[in-house]
Amino acid sequence: IFKDILDDLMESDKSIQEILDEKGLVLVNDKDAVITLVKGVLAENIEMVKQYKDGNTRASKALMGQVMKVSKGSIDPSLANSVLMECLDNYE
């Protein structure tokens, strides 16, 4: 989303929220929606989850990339990361 609004942000004195509203872009902050998306990504990437559980912390970064890819960047990254880590730590 940031890439889509960067030029507008630099060329105007509008707030980020005003630009997002004008372009019809929404940053998802609904934790339940993020949890559902993250669980889907984890289910599709079992091998990376196993790598993370085996101590490969870089796997969490790859999974975060997948979450952002699937969401097309529409999820608040800090929320997505905290949900991802919570789901990974509780994954069975």
Image (spheres, helix red, strand yellow):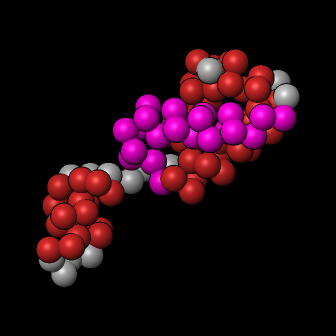
Q: Which region shows up in magenta?
A: 55-76
Q: Looking at the image, can residue 69 be seen?
A: yes
Within the magenta stretch, is there residue 61? yes
Q: Point out the residue furthest to the bottom here.
A: 13
The answer to which of 66 and 15 lies nearer the viewer is 66
Residue 71, quarter of picture: top left
32 sits to left or right of 6: right
Image coords of residue 55 (percent x, y): 84, 35
Image coords of residue 46 (percent x, y): 68, 18
Q: Looking at the image, can residue 21 be seen?
A: no
Residue 63, quarter of picture: top right
76 sits to left or right of 25: right
Residue 92, quarter of picture: top right
Image coords of residue 79 (percent x, y): 57, 53
86 sits to left or right of 13: right
As displayed, is residue 22 above or below residue 16?
Answer: above
The answer to which of 51 and 32 lies nearer the viewer is 51
Residue appearing at x 38%, y 53% in the figure:
27
The answer to which of 19 and 50 lies nearer the viewer is 50
Residue appearing at x 22%, y 70% in the figure:
9
Residue appearing at x 59%, y 35% in the figure:
62
As displayed, is residue 6 above or below residue 88?
Answer: below
